């Protein structure tokens, strides 16, 4: 056999092997999807909520040796049943909301990372907790919320590499991923820096966070920007995935994006207003606006509940001030992604 024929035969064999691997992977994913869909939706929802609560309680109990009781020194002592029950109910609300909105495991990971970031950032920056304590607690929060969704819900088309979606090339473009991540990180960094530079947030920290051990971060000035930027890079990546990737991947085709501008005879006023406002927006814009509003709202509400409800000697007004800073950063980040998506071809 000539060398050329051998090369052709080798190439054909390699192509066949890769095709077989692709088919096997697709078959495994289809089988997993079928197994998940056999479970009734209500049962899956209940399993997601209760397994998240159970996993969180179990992991926090098992890691007391790692945290060395540091969390207890800065946490409020919840003595009544309604205080403990209220926090558990809020955890169930978080999981239930993510389930109802159709989030998959990756969505939940990014969403939970961002909504709990203000709380753990506060503990690590101003309360001097060891990195192992903060990261362990953060990991438990993320794992207990994300794992049930990974097991009980199939990936959305945006996060499924086997599904054809619009703008797949943009989402897989590495420079675009880097630039959008850096942009989101910069917004969070500058927002925090400006809030420290004014007298408003430092005053709130001193007056509403009693016996705050360390406020040197407030007075770090421009010299502290590089450290803050590097620590917030994961937040920028999470914001990019939750806002930009999900909305860009939801872009409709040209046929779907054509909106009827003329009014319909006998149409209710509310329907007309809806059609000419929200209904006139493209699918990607609707997804971006709704997710940005959800993220900003949950950043504020979750921060108030977690900080005022669990951190010792912090009142609601102080928690609201801290949550407002992060909510503003989320809104500005969403506006930046909207500006990017307004470019032709995105």
Image (cartoon, helix red, strand yellow):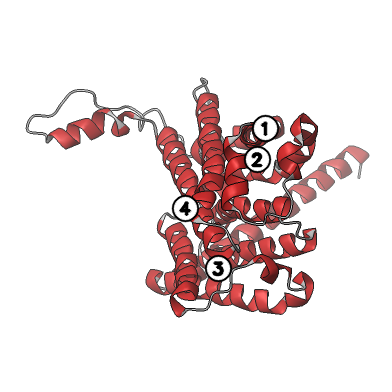
Residues under labels 2 and 4: Cα distance?
20 Å
Q: Which residue is mark 3?
A: 148
Residues under labels 2 and 3: Cα distance?
24 Å
Whether residues under marks 2 and 3 lie with C-beta atoms below 8 angstroms apart, the answer is: no
Residues under labels 1 and 2: Cα distance?
8 Å
Q: Under tag 4, what secondary structure?
A: helix
Q: Which residue is mark 1?
A: 186
The residue mark sitting in front, 3 or 4, is 4
Q: Under tag 1, what secondary structure?
A: helix
Q: Earlier in the sequence, mark 2 or mark 4?
A: 2
Rendered image quadrant of residue 146: bottom right
Rendered image quadrant of residue 235: top right
Whether residues under marks 2 and 4 lie with C-beta atoms below 8 angstroms apart, the answer is: no
Query: How many labels, in total?
Result: 4
Residues under labels 1 and 3: Cα distance?
32 Å
Residue that appears at 57% across and 55% down: 112
Residue that appears at 70% across and 43% down: 232
Q: Which residue is mark 4?
A: 301
Q: 127 left or right of 344? A: right
Q: Residues within 10 Å of mark 4 (few under 14, many from 20)?
A: some
Whether residues under marks 1 and 2 lie with C-beta atoms below 8 angstroms apart, the answer is: yes
Q: Earlier in the sequence, mark 3 or mark 4?
A: 3
Residue 31 at x, y = what percent?
55, 67
């Amino acid at each position: 056999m000539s060398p050329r024929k051998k090369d052709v035969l080798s190439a054909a064999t390699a192509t066949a092997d890769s095709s077989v691997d692709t088919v096997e992977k697709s078959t495994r994913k289809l089988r997993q999807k079928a197994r998940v869909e056999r479970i009734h939706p209500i049962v899956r929802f209940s399993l997601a909520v209760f397994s998240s609560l159970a996993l969180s309680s179990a992991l926090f109990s098992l890691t007391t040796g790692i945290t060395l009781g540091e969390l207890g020194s800065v946490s409020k002592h919840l003595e009544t049943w309604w205080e403990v029950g209220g926090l558990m109910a809020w955890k169930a609300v978080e999981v239930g909301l993510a389930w109802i909105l159709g989030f998959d495991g990756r969505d939940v990971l990014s969403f939970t990372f961002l909504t709990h970031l203000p709380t753990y950032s506060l503990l690590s920056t101003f309360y001097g907790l060891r990195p192992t304590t903060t990261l362990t607690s953060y990991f438990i929060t993320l794992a207990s919320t994300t794992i049930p969704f990974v097991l009980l819900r199939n990936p959305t088309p945006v996060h499924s590499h086997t599904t054809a979606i619009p703008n797949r090339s943009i989402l897989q473009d590495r420079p675009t991923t880097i630039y959008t991540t850096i942009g989101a990180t910069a917004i969070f960094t500058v927002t925090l820096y400006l809030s420290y530079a004014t007298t408003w947030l430092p005053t709130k920290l001193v007056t509403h966070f009693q016996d705050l051990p360390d406020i040197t971060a407030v007075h770090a000035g421009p010299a502290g920007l590089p450290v803050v930027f590097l620590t917030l890079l994961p937040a920028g990546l999470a914001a990019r995935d939750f806002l930009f990737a999900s909305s860009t991947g939801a872009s409709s085709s040209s046929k779907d994006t054509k909106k009827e501008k003329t009014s319909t005879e006998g149409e209710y006023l509310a329907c007309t207003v809806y059609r000419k406002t929200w209904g006139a927006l493209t699918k990607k814009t609707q997804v971006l606006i709704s997710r940005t509003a959800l993220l900003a709202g949950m950043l504020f509400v979750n921060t108030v509940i977690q900080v005022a409800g669990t951190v010792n000697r912090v009142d609601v007004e102080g928690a609201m001030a801290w949550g407002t800073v992060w909510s503003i950063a989320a809104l500005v980040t969403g506006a930046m992604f909207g500006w990017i998506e307004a470019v032709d071809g995105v």
